Image (tube, rainbow, N blue to C red):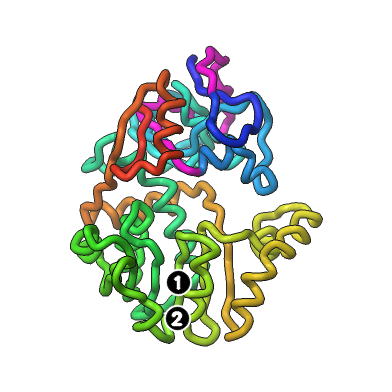
């Protein structure tokens, strides 16, 4: 079968190879799937650059790709919840990525059935962002009617996080480009700030929780609007010691991340607040629940340029350039 691989970490322009590789082995708890569509993400670039090697070290050659839509070809001896021919999707398990290939063997617990209303391209754009939103919300432990601020919520992450947050009964406040205001409010946001003309820190106080999608520079602003004891979950800030411990990293990495995350934890401690970093993991049941909510809301992710497997390098460059059209797709 054909697969897109890299032979090592390389900072900058990602160089990949299209190769013939052996078919994956299917364990008792695995499902062999034929890949129809894969999504290309900034995470793929971070992996190729070596930016996440302290969190997830990879062996080479490495088949690229983290999320996909596929059709079940064969099921393992202990799998009884999927049938041959079923259209499924997944954020692949961290140690078994490889969506940029014709076939993948996936742990059945990572898979969910694709809602019928979605095209393959739309469905491929969902797993990573939907699971990130769900896992961030779980960390926040917010009660119904609590207020939640999502920074940069007019993008692809907000398109998943806002309806999933609203489904939990949260009052969602977000910021973004004014051109996306009506679409973002329609997804379930209660209040929207145009980041070009409005400073949300001048209007908000005592917010119950926040999700940061912009990074460390935004964190002081987020902490300033939160109530005493509230929590920030960051997708792009620095990892910290509590993340490393929860993630099961070795002790030396726990100490390392405790040091690099100390600045953010000290900032949080001023008002008894908490800081969490998140690195999304696979979870088929969680993805299935999220998919049912998105189906009820008829949420359709924006799809950008579509490439063939041979054009994988071009697709990665598209993501690196910050494609504004929507999720970049590789179609097999």
Q: Cβ–Cβ below 8 Å for labels 1 and 2?
A: yes
Q: Where is 285 relative to 147, above or below?
A: above
Q: Which residue shows up at 41% across the image and 85% down it? A: 205
Extreme residue in the front direction: 197
Q: Which residue shows up at 51% across the image and 34% down it? A: 106
In terms of secondary structure, where does tag 1 sit? strand
Q: Which residue shows up at 45% across the image and 81% down it? A: 225
Using the image as rendered, state which of residue 199 and residue 160 is in the foreground. Answer: 199
| Residue 249, image x, y percentages | 72, 53
- Return the mark for residue 225: 2
Using the image as rendered, state which of residue 71 and residue 331 is in the foreground. Answer: 331
How crowded pointer 2 is (Cα within 10 Å; few <14, some 14-19, many 20+) is rated as many
Give the extent of the magenta segment. Answer: 16-42
Query: Which one is in front in this view, the residue at disc 1 or the one at disc 2?
Result: 2
Which residue has dot 1 on it?
210
Position of residue 149 in the picture relative to residue 182 (left or right) = right
């Amino acid at each position: 079968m054909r697969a897109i691989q890299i032979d090592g970490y390389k900072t900058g322009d990602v160089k990949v190879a299209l190769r013939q590789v052996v078919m994956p082995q299917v364990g008792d708890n695995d499902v062999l799937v034929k890949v129809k569509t894969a999504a290309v993400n900034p995470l793929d670039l971070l992996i190729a650059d070596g930016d996440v090697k302290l969190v997830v070290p990879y062996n080479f050659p490495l088949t690229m790709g983290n999320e996909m839509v596929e059709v079940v070809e064969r099921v393992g001896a202990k799998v009884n919840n999927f049938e041959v021919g079923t259209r499924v999707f997944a954020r692949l398990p961290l140690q078994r990525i490889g969506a940029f290939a014709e076939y993948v063997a996936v742990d059945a617990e990572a898979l969910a059935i694709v809602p019928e209303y979605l095209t393959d391209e739309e469905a491929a754009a969902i797993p990573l962002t939907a699971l990130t939103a769900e896992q961030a919300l779980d960390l926040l432990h917010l009660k119904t009617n609590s207020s939640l601020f999502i920074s940069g919520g007019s993008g692809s992450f907000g398109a998943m996080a806002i309806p999933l947050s609203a489904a939990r009964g949260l009052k969602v406040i977000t910021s973004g480009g004014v051109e996306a205001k009506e679409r973002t409010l329609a997804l379930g946001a209660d209040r929207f700030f145009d980041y070009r003309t409005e400073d949300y820190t001048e209007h908000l106080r005592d917010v119950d929780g926040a999700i940061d999608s912009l990074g460390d520079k935004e964190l002081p602003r987020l902490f300033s609007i939160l109530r005493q004891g509230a929590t920030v979950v960051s997708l792009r800030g620095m990892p910290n010691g509590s993340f490393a411990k929860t993630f099961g990293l070795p002790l030396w990495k726990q100490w390392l991340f405790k040091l690099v995350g100390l600045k953010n934890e000290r900032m949080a401690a001023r008002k008894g607040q908490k800081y969490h970093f998140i690195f999304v993991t696979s979870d088929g049941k969680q993805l299935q629940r999220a998919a049912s909510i998105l189906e009820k809301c008829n949420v359709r992710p924006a799809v950008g340029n579509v490439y063939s497997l041979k054009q994988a390098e071009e697709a990665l460059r598209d993501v690196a350039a910050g494609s504004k059209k929507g999720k970049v797709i590789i179609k097999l």
